[in-house]
Amino acid sequence: MKKPLIAVGALCAVLAASAGNAQDRRFAYEADLAAPAKRAAVRAGGVEWSCSGTRCTAEARGGGSNVSVRGCSELARGAGAVARYAGEARQLGEKELAECNQLATAVSPAPAPAAAPAPVAAAKPAPPQPAAGRTVTPEMTYTGVWPGGREAGAKQ
Amino acid sequence: MRRAAVLVAPVLAALALAAAPAAAQEFALDVPVRVADLPPAASVGSVTCALFADPGGPTNNLGYLGSGSKWFQLKDGGYAGTLSVPVRIAPQAVARSYKCALFVIYKEDGRTLTAAASRISDVNRTEYKAPFRRAPGSPFLGEVSGTLPR
């Protein structure tokens, strides 16, 4: 009669331990910068980052929920332009990286909450209204030096 | 019973309307882009625009409302065209200024890197490779900003 009780107790202990491990589990985060970091320590996306050279690393709870454009932009603002921003569960795509770097140079968004909530499947957003406004900007222009003949002594 | 239903229906309809998310405004910025003579490592470019409620937002970063991006494929290191960059902002928001930046996506040592054109073409920044330098004497505008009419 005692055996079932012991078995149940052991099962509860195992479940409690595994639940505790899941809560305490810390995930690794990595970011590559386009240039050596401006600062060695940066708080971004609710995570404390340590940067050396062009590599920044961090550890925190939540494998993918801390990987956000906002967190990336906070890191970019503190350490420099970000070329890769990843957690164990996911990493930012090219489009998100471009937005991250643009946000870092153009805006100062409110700091991300310490534990960024996972995306919530909210009610289907209403379709956008027709263009509320439209404007034409000056032309953006950039001419490089490829294939290299334009700049004397250019290294290829 | 039927009367009760008639009374309840408008209430339910009103509740449903109140619960429905308000539609976002979609703003469009038409950005002419002219890029040329970029190295083969660069395959894609993008323009990202941000809107601000503050007329001085592009410089003081106040009143950020939202941002959006548009991509373009580089062909033979170049692109010429006008990108319509959509930016969604809150229904009640009033945009008073904008800022757009040009980005280049390129490969280096097997990695995909994103960099602002204004940085990689800066002759004073030595960390970027020579092929991304700006052609001497060529016109350059990697960021644009301005105010919007009321």
Image (cartoon, coloured by chain):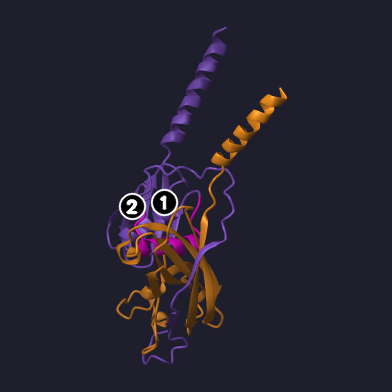
Chain colours: A purple, B orange
Quadrant location, the C terminus of chain B: bottom left
Above or below residue A127? Residue A152 is below
Crowding at mark 2 (Cα within 10 Å: few <14, some 14-19, many 20+)? many
Quarter of the figure with residue A101:
bottom left
Q: What stretch is highlighted in magenta?
A: A90-109
Whether residue B97 is visible, yes or no, is: yes
- Name the one closer to the observer, A114 or A54: A114
Q: Residue furthest front?
A: B3
Number of the label disc, if any, that sits on residue A29: 1
Tell me the amino acid under the disc marked 1. Answer: Tyr
Residue B41's spot in the image, x, y percent?
Answer: 49, 76
Q: In this view, does B120 lie to the left or right of A4?
A: left
Above or below residue A72? Residue B124 is below
Residue A27 in the magenta stretch? The answer is no
At 68% across and 28% down in the image, what residue appears?
B5
Q: Mark 1 lies on which chain?
A: A
Q: Is residue B147 left or right of residue B60?
A: right
Residue B123's spot in the image, x, y percent?
Answer: 32, 81
Crowding at mark 1 (Cα within 10 Å: few <14, some 14-19, many 20+)? many
Which residue position holds label 2?
Answer: A49
Residue A153's spot in the image, x, y percent?
Answer: 36, 90
Asked if the residues shown at circle 2 and circle 1 are in contact, with their CB atoms under 8 angstroms apart, the answer is yes
